[in-house]
Amino acid sequence: MLEVSGLCFHYQPHVPVLNDLTFSVSDGEIVGLSGKNGVGKTTTLKLILGLLPPEKGSVRLGNCSLYLHPMQYRKQINYVSDSHDIYNNLTGKEYLNFIADMYEVPSETRGKIYTPLIKSFQVEKYLSSPVKKLSHGTKQKIAIMASLVNDPLLWVLDEPMTGLDVEAVQVLKELIKSRAACGKSVLFSSHILEICENLCDKIIIMQAGTIKKTIRLCDNPSCISLEDIYLEVVNDVPMDKGFSIKQNNM
Ligand SMILES: Nc1ncnc2c1ncn2[C@@H]1O[C@H](COP(=O)(O)OP(=O)(O)OP(=O)(O)O)[C@@H](O)[C@H]1O
Ligand SMILES: [Mg+2]
């Protein structure tokens, strides 16, 4: 289980981005992180990855603290970033092997993990090209594949559906579901509420650097759409007023 407790963070002095952020992701749970642009979703994911240092707070995965046992912690997690600029000079195949080397995954094991993914995402023909020559969606597919090479306990994805074609979105949804089915956790940020609604066990809505609301999908009566709940939460508008605003704008 991931436990994030009391995280505080700022990029610039006196401009807090995260403010006492606390939430958890259980084993086998799929959690969506949503909220307005600039609210701190990517920053939160980077802190969980250990890519940014917090001002205060703790992050634990099972028995491992990110700050006390960083190597052990990092081996159990992997990440799909919202940008892929870091490996542009490698070919797709070199990048996949580079990530596998970083996680010390033996060649036989990486083959077993990558081969079905290459087939599902239909990227075989692109793997010899430098990543910089690939389309955004193809880069995204390669980043997704690489992020599974260590079979992470926690799979973190930042707006992973962006730029993927319809078939690839289907593949990704199935991957997310199949990981949860075998007890692994998934945390992803998204603005696409339909995807969150179909995939997630719970959705966390951020506002002002903290958690404004956690929605457990199993508790959500199907007569109220997630979009209406979201708009009520982020705009502080009562539900019936939210409906009338939408109608007036049509
Ligand atoms: N490197 C940086 N230096 C300074 N400020 C930053 C930096 N990165 C992000 N910020 C600021 O931190 C805040 C949170 O940004 P973040 O990227 O985490 O938001 P987000 O919720 O992921 O937004 P989006 O939905 O657009 O992806 C924003 O105000 C942003 O301008
Ligand atoms: Mg973001």
Image (tube, rainbow, N blue to C red):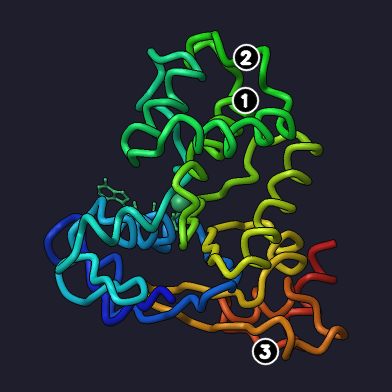
Q: Name the residue located 50 percent from the left edge and 32 percent from the top edge.
A: 108
Q: Residue at x 20, y 59 (%)?
A: 70
What residue does disc 3 label?
238
> What kind of element bears circle 3?
loop
Task: Please tell me which residue is depicted at 42% across the width and 80% down the height of the picture.
Answer: 23
From the image, state whether disc 1 or disc 3 is nearer to you: 1
Instruction: Return the disc, 2 or 1, that comes first in the chain's sequence.
Output: 2
Q: Nearer the viewer, mark 2 or mark 3?
A: 2
Q: CA distance from mark 1 to mark 3?
A: 42 Å
Marker disc for residue 70: none
Report helix, strand or loop for mark 1.
Answer: helix
Q: Nearer the viewer, residue 188 or 61?
A: 61
Q: Position of residue 17 (x, y in %)?
A: 29, 65
Quarter of the N terminus within the rendering: bottom left
Q: Horizontal and vertical percent for residue 34? A: 55, 65
Tag 2 near tag 1, CB within 8 Å: yes
Q: Disc 2 marks which amino acid?
A: Tyr
Q: Secondary structure at mark 2?
A: helix
Question: From what the image shows, is residue 171 above or below residue 117?
Answer: below
Q: Quadrant of residue 171?
A: top right
Q: Which residue is mark 1?
A: 138
The relative height of residue 226 versus residue 66 in the rendered view (above or below) is below
> What's under tag 3, amino acid-wise?
Pro
Residue corresponding to mark 2: 126
Q: Are marks 1 and 3 in contact (CB under 8 Å)?
A: no
Label 3 neighbourhood size at 10 Å, few (<14), some (14-19), many (20+)?
few
Residue 166: quadrant of the picture: top right
Question: Foreground: 164 or 60?
Answer: 60
Assess disc 2: are there few (<14), some (14-19) or many (≥20) residues with their C-alpha within 10 Å of its C-alpha.
some
Q: Is residue 85 visible?
A: yes
